[in-house]
Image (tube, rainbow, N blue to C red):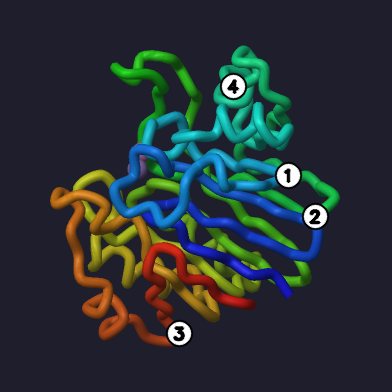
Amino acid sequence: MPEVRFLGHSCVTITEGEHKLIIDPFISDNPKAPVKADEIDVNYILLTHGHGDHVGDAIAIAIRTGATVIANFELASLVASEGVVMHPMHIGGGHDFPFGRVKLTIAHHGGGYGPDASRYTGPPVGFLVTIGGKVIYHPGDTGLFLDMKLIGEMNKIDLAFLPIGDNFTMGLDDAVKAVEFLQPKKVIPFHYDTWDLIAENPAKFADRVQGAEVIILKPGESLKL
Ligand code: NI
Ligand code: MN
């Protein structure tokens, strides 16, 4: 049974036996991170898009651990230019890895790496990760989109992460609608409270969601699926 651990913002680890994944490892510059980047030990690093609060410590972790970076072709090529092992994919494509399957979904957001976000990193993506018989959806940064309904119809989602912090991503109202579209068994809200600009009360989200169990994890807390 896979275990997910929330490391603040949009960073989560997924562990299943010997398989250790991290998504969007924004740790060193995250005021809420419960760990240090050099404590992270993983085989795979999944990146949803090129913004600094998602790529985070990916390159340093990949170089230290030898982990493979999974990302869209443009972002994967960028990290490869820094000497990192990568597996490029793109939206709509899935691939079977030793730990399970990853499929890339659309996301409505931006991309761009570096201090002025000027290095092209292609379109943002979300991930459907199938591991240990469970389906986990990490949408990355995104606004609400109607295709979430299709994602929900075509996948029995055991756990969906959803941004609720507003401003850069969907806020509370749209995240409640996203749960309706995706029909996951469990939902964990994220991408809030990292800074004042995206402050939100996750209990309000939990009060309003129907048909799914909302689990509020503090940075550092985990959940077994
Ligand atoms: Ni972003
Ligand atoms: Mn973000």
Q: Amino acid at mark 3?
A: Glu
**Mark 3 beta carbon near ligand 2 (under 8 Å):** no
Q: Earlier in the sequence, mark 3 or mark 1?
A: 1
The alpha-carbon separation of the residues under discs 3 and 1 comes to 30 Å
Please provide percent x and percent y for residue 110.
36, 32
Q: Which residue is mark 4?
A: 79
Q: Amino acid at mark 2?
A: Phe
Q: Which mark is residue 213?
A: 3
Determine whether label 1 and label 2 are within 8 Å by CB: yes
Q: Earlier in the sequence, mark 1 or mark 4?
A: 1
Q: Quadrant of ligand 2?
A: top left
Q: Amino acid at mark 1?
A: Asn
Residue at x-position 48% and y-position 55%: 147
Please provide percent x and percent y for residue 49.
47, 35
Quadrant assignment for the N terminus:
bottom right
Q: Is residue 116 above or below residue 19?
A: above
Q: Which residue is mark 2?
A: 99
Q: Amino acid at mark 4?
A: Val
- Mark 1 neighbour density, 10 Å: few (under 14) some (14–19) many (20 or more): some
Viewer-proximal residue among 204 and 108: 204
Of helix, strand and loop, which one carries label 2? Answer: loop
Of helix, strand and loop, which one carries label 4? Answer: helix
Of helix, strand and loop, which one carries label 1? Answer: loop
Q: Earlier in the sequence, mark 2 or mark 4?
A: 4
Q: Which residue is mark 1?
A: 43
Q: Is residue 120 above or below residue 85?
A: above
